Amino acid sequence: MGLFDITEARATLAELLPVLDEIVALRARAAELSTDLAASAGPTEQGGLPELKGMHARLDELMTKVQETGAELKGFAPLLLDFPADLDDGTPIHLCWLEGDRDIAWYHRQDCGFAGRRPLE
């Protein structure tokens, strides 16, 4: 996939926000069900192993949708997305989105990773 400019990355993020929100909600439900199943001898009020497998399958589908846009899924809990881009001087960067954000307001050099995050100016 190609590089994003900030306008393209923000438009892609806007399209992905419902998908990302579903991932966050489903991730929590799957974690709770998994914990409940580990503590019980059988199905719980939330379901059983078939429901958990269904949740995992849906999470895989949703994560594939994210990756098909060219965004890179860098973290699952919390969700972290990078959009490959270049600074005006050609420096390779990632426009960075972190779960809880509703916009892209950060970037980091590709060789620095999350620790090198800086606000977009």
Image (tube, rainbow, N blue to C red):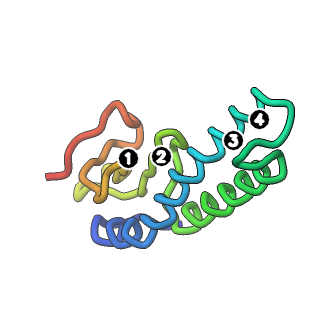
- Circle 2 is placed at which residue position? 79
Measured in 3D between alpha carbons, the distance from the residue under mark 1 to the one under mark 4, in whole angstroms, is: 30 Å
- For the residue pair 15 and 28, the one nearer the viewer reads as 28
Q: Amino acid at mark 1?
A: Leu
Rendering coords of residue 30 (x, y %): 65, 45
Contact (Cβ within 8 Å) of mark 2 with mark 1: yes
Measured in 3D between alpha carbons, the distance from the residue under mark 2 to the one under mark 1, in whole angstroms, is: 6 Å
Snapshot quadrant of residue 119: top left
Residue closest to the far front: 45
Residue shown at 82%/42% (left/top)?
A: 43
Labelled disc at residue 33: 3
Under tag 3, what secondary structure? helix
How many residues crowd mark 1 within 10 Å: few (<14), some (14–19), many (20+)?
some
Under tag 2, what secondary structure? strand
- Asked whether residue 92 is in view, the answer is no
Contact (Cβ within 8 Å) of mark 2 with mark 3: no
- Circle 1 is placed at which residue position? 98
